[in-house]
Amino acid sequence: MEIVQRDFYNRPADVVGVELLGKILRVHDRMCRIIEVEAYFGPCDPASRARRGSRGRIARALHGPPGLSLVYGMHRQWLLNIVAHPDWMAGAVLLRSCTLLGPGGVIKGPGRLTRYMGIDRSMDSLPVYDPGSPLQVLDDGYRPSSILKGGRIGVREDLELPLRFYIKQPD
């Protein structure tokens, strides 16, 4: 298993989102396989926190260095994003669901994912590509055979592109 390198995140959020599917999220000693993500962009994206010239912490992070974690609270839950964009853009990928490695099942929903994995605001701005970080993304060579696309969940206004990507799980 190898750590996913920093350059991987220096591409548009939708490209990174698709390629994060099947990767391993490791937080300390817990690991799960990423099976659902959503891509968010900069000011042109009506569902993005970088919309309308916002200058808050989240908007700044979306323009910040690719490969850093972006953890923020919504609906009394922590959400984990990974900043992903080329130098001239903004963006991040929200991790929505994962499957546990070993015994267990699917963790559906971004709030449940962070709760199970023990992610909170203290893990904001960590480099997920750093071998010394407690929060990492790893590649074990697994590649999903089929990736599905759809609209993002829970957004009032969305782009016409399908920006939610997921691996279909058996019922």
Image (cartoon, helix red, strand yellow):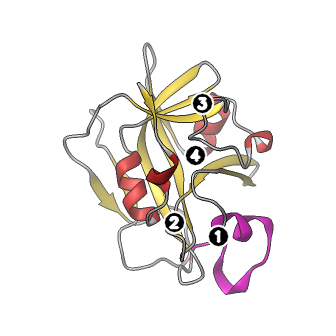
Q: Amino acid at mark 1?
A: His
Alpha carbon distance from label 3 to label 2: 21 Å
Among numbered discs 4 and 1, the one appearing first in the sequence: 1
Amino acid at the residue labelled 2: His
Residue located 69% across and 30% down the image: 118
The Cα atoms of the two marked residues, 3 and 4, are separated by 24 Å
**Who comes first in sequence, dot 4 or dot 2?**
2
Kindly indicate whether the residue at mark 1 contacts the one at mark 2 (C-beta within 8 angstroms). Answer: yes
User: Residue 125 at x, y = what percent?
Assistant: 72, 49
Task: Measuring from the top left, give residue 110's x and y in whole percent.
Answer: 57, 46
Estimate how packed mark 3 is, as few (under 14), some (14 to 19) or many (20 or more) residues with alpha carbons within 10 Å: some
Provide the residue designation for mark 4.
110
Q: Is residue 61 magenta?
A: yes
Q: Residue furthest top?
A: 103
Residues at marks 4 and 1, CA–CA distance in whole angstroms? 22 Å
Please give the residue where the numbered disc 2 appears in the rendered image: 85
Around disc 2, counting alpha carbons within 10 Å, would you say few (fewer than 14), some (14 to 19), or many (20 or more)? Answer: many
Q: Nearer the viewer, mark 4 or mark 1?
A: 1
Which residue corresponds to mark 3? 131
Tell me the amino acid under the disc marked 4.
Answer: Pro
